[in-house]
Amino acid sequence: MNTEAIDGRMLFAIPKKGRLHEKCIELLAGADIQFRRHNRLDVCLVMNHPIALVFLPAADIPSFVGEGNVDIGITGHDVILEAKMEGRVTEMQRLGFGKCALQVQVPEIGPIKSVEDLAGKRVVTSFEVLAGEYFDRLDDRLQITGENKTKIEYVGGSVEAACALGLADGIVDLVESGDTMRAAGLHAIATLIQSEAVLIKSTVPKNPKIVPLIDLIASRIAGVVAAGKFVICSYNVSRDKLHAALIITPGRRAPTISPLEEENWVAVNSMVEKNKMAAIMDELVKVGAEDILIFKLDNCRV
Ligand SMILES: Nc1ncnc2c1ncn2[C@@H]1O[C@H](COP(=O)(O)OP(=O)(O)OP(=O)(O)O)[C@@H](O)[C@H]1O
Ligand SMILES: O=P(O)(O)OC[C@H]1O[C@H](OP(=O)(O)OP(=O)(O)O)[C@H](O)[C@@H]1O
């Protein structure tokens, strides 16, 4: 693709593979950003907006956005800190996926029980900046200096194998379910940061003309994220029990209450958080609500 084709378009960086890729593709579909990626090309034009998508490794996206080479992007909060780009990118929206923690892990069976025990030994990681800063502070606190300081070594992947291979006394790596860590016989002894996927833009946009388009896309993405977080809860309840029911489902702004043909009965519609839905239904049954239904949201602006 020649550079003329992307001239004037807003450049939007998307992780080209890995843990965040599929979720980003779903998010683009939800925001009606239409594209066809030919032959896995890393740049492709959006058909219904003046946008070009740029598929990049998640870890490279913070610097591409921070240096203004692309306008917005989706990546992990962890790699923004690792790239030291927190001052040069603005996190516009947390996206609710790619949730994980960067943790110090050591063999479950062994002499190291705390980070203090690990200080001064060998640590293998893909996050050498964050791990380096963490162990520098720890070494300082424990007055470990010079040759005795903790040795941080970089590997690009399969970090969890380092202890079993005798390359490290501990590792710093991402944990979500904990399955990888447990399978490698490791356990966590400290957490450096919590992370999730975020929508970012450059702190100083190169092209002010595209600011309205950035805001439009951010608002659409916020709508898709909110639609994933909430459901609509609908139920019938007699007026004498309405007060108790509304305490359980107060809604985001306020619930919608409509009279039923049956005297003294009303129908209630209210937005509730998806992850609280089962408990809310249990509570509604207890206070006498009936015909409780849950509806998924496809999209919203709230
Ligand atoms: N187990 C996980 N659960 C949730 N999110 C994760 C997990 N592992 C990584 N992430 C998030 O996804 C981002 C990209 O990680 P991933 O390992 O997929 O990157 P990659 O190196 O581009 O892909 P690959 O591992 O396939 O080479 C991380 O920076 C982090 O924010
Ligand atoms: O706690 P869990 O749910 O098991 O997830 C943690 C694993 O996920 C990430 O690696 P990934 O599987 O993306 O592959 P990688 O080692 O190639 O980066 C991370 O580096 C851990 O190895």
Image (cartoon, rainbow, N blue to C red):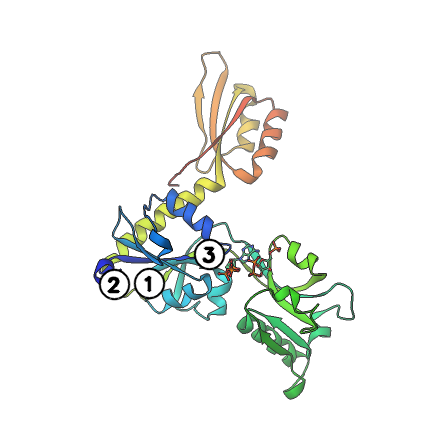
Identify which residue is drawn at 35% across, 65% down.
Answer: 203
| Quadrant for the C terminus in the image | top left
- Cα gap from disc 3 to disc 1, whole angstroms: 18 Å
Residue hosting label 2: 207
Q: Is residue 17 left or right of residue 244?
A: left
Residue 254 or residue 75, whichever sits in front: 75
Residue hosting label 1: 70
Q: Nearer the viewer, mark 3 or mark 1?
A: 3
Residue 260: % across, % down: 45, 16
Residue 118 visible in image:
yes
Q: Amino acid at mark 2?
A: Asn
Residue 242: % across, % down: 53, 24
Residue hosting label 3: 17
Q: Residues within 10 Å of mark 3 (few under 14, many from 20)?
A: few
Looking at mark 3, is its residue's CB closer than 8 Å to ligand 1? yes
- Cα gap from disc 3 to disc 2, whole angstroms: 28 Å
Residue 49 or residue 208, whichever sits in front: 49
Along the polypeptide, which appears first: circle 3 or circle 1?
3
Q: Amino acid at mark 1?
A: Val
SS assignment at label 3:
loop
Residue 292 or residue 51, whichever sits in front: 51
